[in-house]
Image: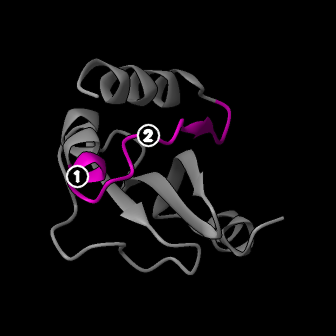
Amino acid sequence: MTSGDAFFRGSQIYDPVALLRRGDGILYVARVGMKASRQFMILMPTGEPAWPHEPLSSLSDIAWALRAHEWHGVIPEPVGPNERQARTLARLLGERA
């Protein structure tokens, strides 16, 4: 269990989509807001934004942000019941690598 697991379990605002691991670093991609929300954030396991330019409006924007911070070589692991968004993010990162 990572420290992010406890954070997301108690959250009604963040819905985790994918987990990225690189060395000792962990980032989460989460949908922000209500269930129908199209806003996403990249979060640290503590629930804090990884970078100040968020929230972002699409998985494509998330892929660009990950690329800009050199996380594009990491394969996103699905988190939560819907694996489709993690697969979409992996495809977007792979297309522009």
Q: Quadrant of the N terminus?
A: bottom right
Q: Which mark is residue 73?
A: 2
Q: Please determine whether, in this image, residue 30 is positioned above or below residue 96.
A: below
The amino acid type, in three-letter code, at marker 1 is Ala
Q: Earlier in the sequence, mark 2 or mark 1?
A: 1
Q: Which mark is residue 86?
A: none
Main secondary structure along the magenta-highlighted residues? loop
In the image, is residue 75 part of the stretch drawn in magenta? yes
In the image, which residues are magenta? 65-81
Q: Is residue 1 left or right of residue 2?
A: right
**Residue under pointer 1:** 65
Q: Is residue 9 left or right of residue 13?
A: right
The answer to which quarter of the image holds residue 45 is bottom right
Instruction: Decide: few, some or many residues near mark 1? Use Cα within 10 Å; few <14, some 14-19, many ≥20.
Output: some
Instruction: Decide: few, some or many residues near mark 2? Use Cα within 10 Å; few <14, some 14-19, many ≥20.
Output: some
Q: Please determine whether, in this image, residue 11 is positioned above or below residue 72.
A: below
Q: Position of residue 11 (x, y in %)?
A: 58, 68
- At 72% from the left edge and 65% from the top edge, which residue is drawn? 5
- At 20% from the left edge and 65% from the top edge, which residue is drawn? 54
Q: Is residue 37 left or right of residue 28?
A: left
